[in-house]
Image: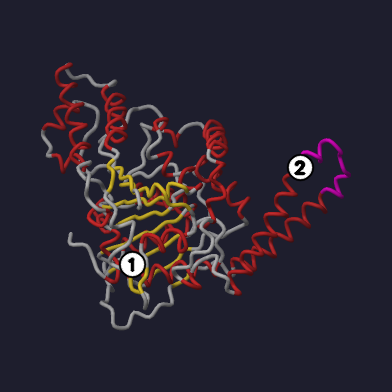
Amino acid sequence: MVFVDFLPAQVDAASSTNALPFTDSPSWLIWSDVKLFFSVLSYVWTIVTPMYSFGSGKLDEMYPSFNNIVCMALHAILIVLQSLFIITIPLWFLYPLPLNVLAVYVVLFWMANKVIWGWLNGDGKPLTSKVPMDGWEEHDDEKWIFMNGISVGDHWLQSNIDRLAMTFRREVTGIHNLTTGIIFDVIECIIERDFCYHTQDSRRAYRLVKEALQDPTNKKVVLILHSQGAIEGSLAIDWLLADLPQHLFRKLEVYTFGAAANHFNNPTRSDTSTLNLARTLSSLSREERTERVIGHIEHYANGGDFVARWGVLNFAKGMNYRNNRFAGRVFESKVATGHLLCQHYLDFMFRWEEGGVVAEENGFVSSLVDVESDVAVRREDASAKTMLAGETTAPSDSKSTAGEYLEGTLANAKGNQRPVRELSRLWKYRNGMSPTD
């Protein structure tokens, strides 16, 4: 039996003037990330387990095909090289070497890595799915974009977008988040999310998504993010929100798997500033108070996924981050493990029948969700208190404001005893179908 926890999207309409966790001091964020990393380290082996389940055949990352074996062998070499390099760094100070010898050592190490990175990544350009769509309904007015996660070279990226294309029967463009090996990729994750640093991949995502949103022939833009791709995608969204008019974001939908991000911004469309907030809220309907710029954001996470526990499951649900911004619904499969997109997420949540058609029944979408209303209410209550701390309204108004603030959360949380298929918007895109907006 599959157990699925469902956390409704955040309702709070404004934030306090205090820094949100992801805007705090980089040194504090790094220290917090390192502590969090070691607190969930016992889950690290679940990244690749189960290892021998191949619902998508050769598209699964660990399926024993020649190309997959080569990718895994190259990553194993990088793990050894990079681990040894990091271990030797303290020795440079304990047993100093001549500067020219040390320089040769570093250059040789870097050159060896660059050669392997080149074999894994190819030219690093965006890829397009190679799945023929003959016989399926056309969706020429939609643009589907995917950004991969940690340790994915061009071969696995092609497998990812082909699996997505077969699942949703749309052409998918893959933005390549280049890999430098698992260890260096994790270090890059910390730099990206703690310094809000945009890599070249994140800048490319910003440009391509911006072009898609500005293209008048696109009625819908779907952005799918996995693992580290969610960090880079969330940073790109921050830039887009600052750069584009709000009406364009009605086209955008965002879906993540095993997100490693520490925030997801999605401001409300209404003016709900803290000045005279009680009066402002009372003049708006519940829908107006909670309507977001980006219409749909959903996050999918395996409860036993190390990266998800280091990312979305901590920052969206952790009580230390109650005043954080992590917009969007969260679906957590409590008993599932694994972090690989095809093998552990898509095979589990969008199981294939013979012929590459998504089966109408599987353990995930048939599960009745357990709504985490206690987490949602405590999260909104924390935001309400920080917001009301700066209020100038009368106590009775403040009390009604807090009530209004939490009312939307409770209404949004009414999902108990409903199956995932009724709550998941992404599920409604399977096999070329579309949600009824």
Residue visible at 26% across and 50% down in the picture: 368
User: Which is the main secondary structure of the residues drawn in magenta?
Assistant: helix
Above-or-below relation of 99 to 171: above
How many C-alpha atoms fall within 10 Å of the one at disc 2: few (<14), some, or many (≥20)?
few
Q: Residue furthest bottom?
A: 134
Q: Residue furthest front?
A: 1
Above-or-below relation of 74 to 277: below
Q: Position of residue 408 (x, y in %)?
A: 19, 37
Numbered disc 1: secondary structure: strand
User: What is the three-letter code of the residue carrying label 2?
Assistant: Ile
Residue visible at 28% across and 43% down in the picture: 370
The range drawn in magenta is: 89-102
Above-or-below relation of 255 to 329: below
- In the image, 365: left or right of 32? left
Query: In 3D space, how far apart are the residues under numbered discs 1 and 2 (Cα atoms)?
Result: 46 Å
N-terminal of the pair, mark 1 or mark 2, is 2
User: What is the three-letter code of the residue carrying label 1?
Assistant: Lys
Q: CB of mark 1 within 8 Å of CB of mark 2?
A: no
Q: Position of residue 229 (x, y in %)?
A: 47, 54
Q: Nearer the viewer, residue 133 or 332?
A: 332
Give the numbered dot on residue 143: 1
Give the numbered dot on residue 89: 2
